[in-house]
Image (tube, coloured by chain):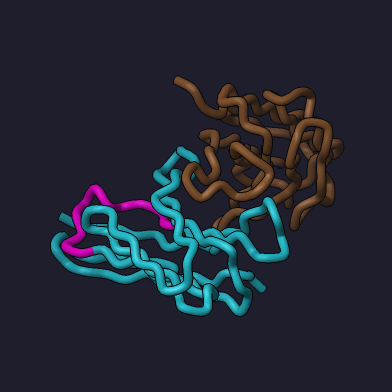
Chain colours: A brown, B cyan
């Protein structure tokens, strides 16, 4: 089915290790986003890409980097993982650079990351 | 401090009861969206409200956008176990352009 695909679904890292979370969408959307979800804190924006070739910081960018590889793919990298980065990470996409009132954001099913 | 405050954070009710979830802010939003999230999945869009005072209905769910476009509510009539899930409001702040800010969520459990 069309949508947003995230890999991996689960990951356990040791403190200091690095990893890249992958996200791909096949809906020809222009904008893509990375959020983290922690209990009682809702979804917080890490980075976003309003269009291919651009990336911007969100609310909680420290400790992360992103790459908009092409229109389909938007990856999130943790260079040196810390226990505070234990979370569920969601990638999302939307058709255009402004919030779409009809389609909103389409989310992937998430990556559950534990840093020990 | 959360830009969007949702209340209550948790709600456990019996099948057939009515409930209301609130989403409040001091900021003005161009639009406000409600999402529902089930365990192990990402949020799914339920509705978008754009005009101050707007009311939208989706079967047993009624969504309202405040006149000043700073708050919203979700009312569920005759709740069913299938309504169980995490309900999230998300606002498109007038100054943010392309980014949605999410509330903390309301975890609803409807018991049979």
Viewer-nearest residue: A62 or B45: B45
A103 vs A38: above or below = above
Quadrant of the image containing the N terminus of chain B? bottom right
Quadrant of the image containing the C terminus of chain B? bottom left
- Left or right, residue A44 beside residue B11: right
* Residue A11 at x, y percent in the picture: 64, 31
- Residue A42 quadrant: bottom right
Write the residue at 75% across / 45% down: A47
* Residue A97 at x, y percent in the picture: 68, 44
Q: Is residue B85 magenta?
A: yes
- Left or right, residue B60 beside residue B101: left
Q: Which residues are magenta?
A: B77-87
A85 vs A113: above or below = below
* Residue B87 at x, y percent in the picture: 42, 57
A53 vs B23: above or below = above
- Residue B22 quadrant: bottom left
Viewer-nearest residue: A99 or A10: A99
* Residue B93 at x, y percent in the picture: 64, 64
Viewer-nearest residue: B72 or A38: B72
Residue A8 visible in rendering: no
Q: Is residue A87 magenta?
A: no
């Amino acid at each position: 089915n069309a949508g947003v695909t995230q890999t991996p679904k689960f990951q356990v890292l040791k403190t200091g290790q690095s990893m890249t979370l992958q996200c791909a969408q096949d809906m020809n959307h222009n904008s893509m986003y990375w959020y983290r979800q922690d209990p009682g804190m809702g979804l917080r924006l890490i980075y976003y890409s309003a269009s291919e070739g651009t990336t911007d910081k969100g609310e909680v960018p420290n400790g992360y980097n992103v790459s908009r590889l092409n229109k389909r793919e938007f990856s999130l990298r943790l260079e040196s993982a810390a226990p505070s980065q234990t979370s569920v990470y969601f990638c999302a996409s939307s058709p255009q650079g402004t919030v779409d009132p009809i389609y909103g954001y389409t989310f992937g099913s998430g990556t559950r990351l534990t840093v020990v | 401090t959360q830009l969007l405050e949702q209340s209550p954070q948790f709600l456990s009710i019996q099948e057939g009861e009515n409930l209301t979830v609130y989403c409040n802010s001091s900021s003005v939003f161009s639009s406000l969206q409600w999402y529902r999230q089930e365990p192990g999945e990402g949020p799914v869009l339920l509705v978008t409200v754009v005009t101050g005072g707007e009311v939208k209905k989706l079967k047993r769910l009624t969504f309202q956008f405040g006149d000043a476009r700073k708050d919203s509510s979700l009312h569920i009539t005759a709740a069913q176990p299938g309504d169980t899930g995490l309900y999230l409001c998300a606002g498109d702040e007038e100054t943010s352009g392309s980014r949605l800010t999410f509330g903390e969520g309301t975890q609803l459990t409807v018991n049979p």
